Image: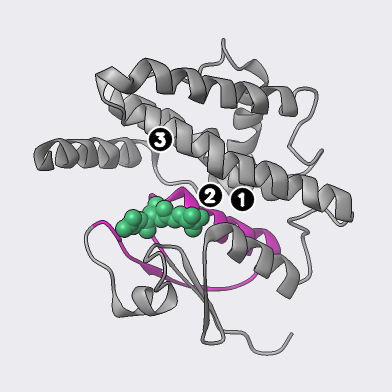
């Protein structure tokens, strides 16, 4: 490929923009990075790049923007050669997309709902979040990473479970994911965060816990 202009608009504490950065790093693609906290303000460049959802990450390749982290990850994987993010086999590619969809739509959604739930809703939501984690626990049993021996699409999409979940649990003071309840998923998480490229691209833990605590207080104050 010739001269490439690659830019990411992201937020240091966002698992979604970190997904995009990890893919770029695994592929060895140089990029410019613009830090934005979308919960404070949204720049004209962010709104132009993602007018539908108005969220980070926004990925801009030679002036053309894309939004939604999974879509961006797939685009980078198709547009650049090198480290494969999705499996090459069509069936395995579709399986990876299936699990990534399950993680975003079921796991992260139910985990977030549970972590931020009011006391009244908590038990019901907790049950659902635990059932979803149990499904993943079964899927990862006997494997190092979701796609086998190397980090791929599903692992990167599951980064919230691998790192962020523990930080939010600590900030909120609620525990859903433990080693005892999910030994295989916990082993996967340890494996994932100890991989060099991943480790170098994780936000500092203490800073992240403090950031979530501040957001929790702000949410309480506005209620
Ligand atoms: N489905 C989106 C989620 C992105 C997302 O939730 N971004 C958050 C930051 S972590 C955001 O920009 N929120 C701003 C808002 O909701 O107004 C993706 O995968 O890219």
Q: Which residue is mark 2?
A: 200
Number of other residues with Cα within 10 Å of mark 2, as a class: few under 14, some 14 to 19, many 20 or more? few
- The answer to whether residue 28 shows anywhere in this view is no
Residue in view at x 74 percent, y 70 percent: 78
Q: Which residue was labeled with disc 1?
A: 197
Of circles 2 and 3, the one toward us is 3
Residue ID at (66%, 69%):
75
If the image is split into quadrants, where does the C terminus sit? top left
Confirm or reject: label 2 Cβ below 8 Å from ligand 1.
no
* Residue receiving disc 3: 112
Give the x, y percent position of residue 5: 56, 84
156 shown above or below 52: above
- Magenta residues (range): 10-39
- Marks 2,1: beta carbons within 8 A: yes
* Nearer-the-camera pick, 198 or 145: 145
Q: Residue at x 63, y 61 (%)?
A: 73
Q: Does 14 appear in magenta?
A: yes
Q: Is residue 71 left or right of residue 9?
A: right
Among numbered discs 3 and 1, the one appearing first in the sequence: 3
Disc 3 is placed on an element classified as: helix
Quick check: can you spot residue 108?
yes
Cα–Cα gap, marks 2 and 1: 5 Å
Q: In whole angstroms, how far apart are the C-alphas of marks 2 and 3? A: 25 Å
């Amino acid at each position: 490929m010739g001269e490439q202009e690659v830019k990411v608009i992201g937020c240091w504490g966002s698992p979604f923009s970190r997904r995009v950065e990890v893919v770029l790093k695994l592929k060895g693609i140089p990029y410019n990075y613009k830090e934005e906290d979308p919960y404070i303000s949204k720049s004209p460049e962010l709104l132009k790049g993602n007018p539908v959802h108005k969220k980070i990450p926004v990925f801009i390749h030679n002036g053309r923007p894309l939004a939604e982290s999974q879509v961006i990850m797939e685009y980078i994987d198709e547009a650049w050669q090198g480290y494969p993010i999705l499996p090459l086999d069509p069936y395995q590619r579709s399986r990876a997309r299936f699990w990534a969809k399950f993680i975003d739509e079921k796991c992260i959604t139910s985990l977030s709902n549970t972590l931020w739930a009011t006391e009244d809703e908590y038990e019901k939501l907790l049950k659902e979040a635990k059932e979803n984690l149990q499904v993943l626990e079964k899927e990862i049993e006997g494997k190092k990473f979701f796609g086998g021996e190397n980090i791929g699409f599903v692992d990167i999409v599951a980064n919230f479970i691998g790192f962020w979940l523990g930080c939010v649990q600590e900030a909120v003071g609620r525990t859903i994911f433990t080693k005892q309840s999910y030994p295989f998923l916990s082993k996967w998480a340890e494996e994932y965060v100890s991989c060099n490229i991943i480790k170098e691209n994780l936000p500092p833990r203490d800073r992240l816990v403090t950031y979530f605590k501040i957001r929790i207080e702000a949410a309480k104050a506005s209620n």
